[in-house]
Image: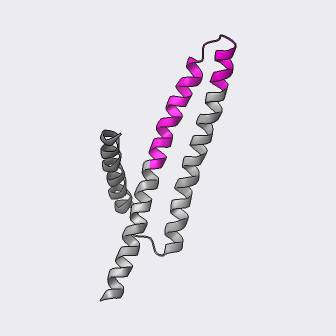
Amino acid sequence: MTYMKKHVTYLAAAELNRANELHPAFASAHEGWAVLLEEIRELSSETHAIEDMHQLAFADVMQDRSACDGIACVYETAIRAACEAIQGAAMAKKYIAMEEGQHEQALR
């Protein structure tokens, strides 16, 4: 898990850099919260889809049919979920940076 966490952390940082090139810092905590909520909901949607596809694949297994197509869908959806999780991590980091920047300005 440490190996994967290192790489996912790198991907989250790369996504944050990409997002920062396209979009300015959050204008407010409200905006940051809303953007993060969107990523969380997208991740949740993908996670629910994985669960649904896994159940359909289970039905195939229980009827001695091939579940390969269903499991392939689980794979593809899990990759999309991982991407959403990375985007969520990046937006969380962007929010933290915004708050830390506000705190630093208040100390001046």
Q: Nearer the viewer, residue 75 or 107?
A: 107
In the image, what residue occupies the spot 58% across and 35% down? 50
Determine whether 72 is above or below 9 in the image. above
Q: Point out the image quarter for the C terminus.
A: bottom left
Q: Position of residue 67 (x, y in %)?
A: 60, 18
Q: Position of residue 57 (x, y in %)?
A: 63, 23
Picture mark count: 0
Determine whether 26 is above or below 44 in the image. below
Q: Is residue 70 magenta?
A: yes
Residue 24 seen from this side? no
Task: Give the quarter of the image for residue 48.
Answer: top right
Q: Residue furthest bottom?
A: 108
Task: Give the quarter of the image for residue 23.
Answer: bottom left
In the image, what residue occupies the spot 40% across and 56% down? 90
Q: Position of residue 14 (x, y in %)?
A: 32, 52
Q: Is residue 51 magenta?
A: no
In the image, what residue occupies the spot 32% across and 42% down? 2
Please give the range of residues in magenta.
Answer: 56-85
Q: Point out the image quarter for the N terminus.
A: top left
Q: Residue furthest top?
A: 64
Identify the main secondary structure in magenta: helix
Determine whether 40 is above or below 75 in the image. below
Horizontal arrangement in the rendering, residue 26 relative to residue 65 (left or right): left
Residue 93 seen from this side? yes
Horizontal arrangement in the rendering, residue 81 relative to residue 102 (left or right): right
Say how the picture is coloured. Answer: one colour
